[in-house]
Image (cartoon, rainbow, N blue to C red):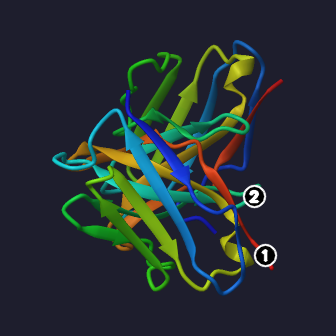
Amino acid sequence: QSVLTQPPSASGAPGQRVTISCFGSNSNIGTNNVNWYQQLPGTAPKLLIYSNNQRPSGVPDRFSGSKSGTSASLAISGLQSDDEADYYCAARDDSLSGVVFGGGTKLTVL
Amino acid sequence: QLQLQESGPGLVKPSETLSLTCTVSGGSISGTIHYWGWIRQPPGKGLEWIGHLHYTGSTYYNSSLKSRVTISVDTSKNQFSLKVTSVTAADTAVYYCARRGGSGGSRYFDYWGQGTLVTVSS
């Protein structure tokens, strides 16, 4: 049972927009920044979004992040087959004094 | 370009100690504000933060693993290490080392190693 809650799966057709949610609490998302990681099959995770809505250099602007209260969302527009991956949210948790991850969402491009 | 590479035994017997090293190239572990950490992923499951440290020695551990985990740094070799004692099958996972970059209240794992699979089995 992960501290941050994500839907186990999401899907969309090429070109569509999909949103992945991440639910937490006051001790994590409610007080700290949220980061998102993309893990392509068989590879290490890659930083996708940091500080709620910032994209590292090289990440297309099709990927965007937002946060409101104790939840966060990752949106992917113009869905491409290469976007098929597992997506994880993460944040610092002040009660646990550490980093917590969501359980991950497997994105399928139909 | 910063690169991280994990190394260590791929097979560990139950009750023994798992030891991994992360070698950092393209940048220095010391003299920076960044932290260096370990994350693991059991086969077919999600990511679990193990802990991270600063080159000055400050360490932070997952409370569920704290009694069995030690993360240390060797600045002369530009490496940091992970030890997990009394391992069981539940410790079987791909272990990643990563840099915890950013600053202040905005920290994130921005550089990752490729990961190494450690299997606990007799």
* Disc 2 element: loop
Residues at marks 2 and 1 on the same chain: yes
Q: Mark 1: few, some, or many residues within 10 Å (few <14, many ≥20)?
A: few
Image x and y of residue B52, in percent? 37, 61
The alpha-carbon separation of the residues under discs 2 and 1 comes to 14 Å
Q: In this picture, is B29 found above or below B95?
A: above
Q: Amino acid at mark 1?
A: Ser
Q: Which residue is labeled 2 in the image?
A: B43
Image x and y of residue A109, in percent? 78, 25
Q: Amino acid at mark 2?
A: Pro
Mark 2 vs 1, N-terminal side: 2
Residue at 38 percent of width and 33 percent of height: B2
Q: Chain of mark 2?
A: B
Q: Between A66 and A86, which is closer to the camera in this rendering?
A: A86
Q: In this picture, is A52 found above or below A13?
A: below
Q: Between A40 and A5, which is closer to the camera in this rendering?
A: A40
Residue A24 can be seen in this image: no
Q: Which residue is labeled 1 in the image?
A: B121
Q: Chain of mark 1?
A: B
Residue at 52 percent of width and 57 percent of height: B39
* Disc 1 element: loop
Q: Is residue A94 left or right of residue B32?
A: right
Q: Between A16 and B118, which is closer to the camera in this rendering?
A: B118
Image x and y of residue B40, in percent? 58, 59
Farthest residue to the right: give it: A110
Give the quarter of the image for residue A12: top right
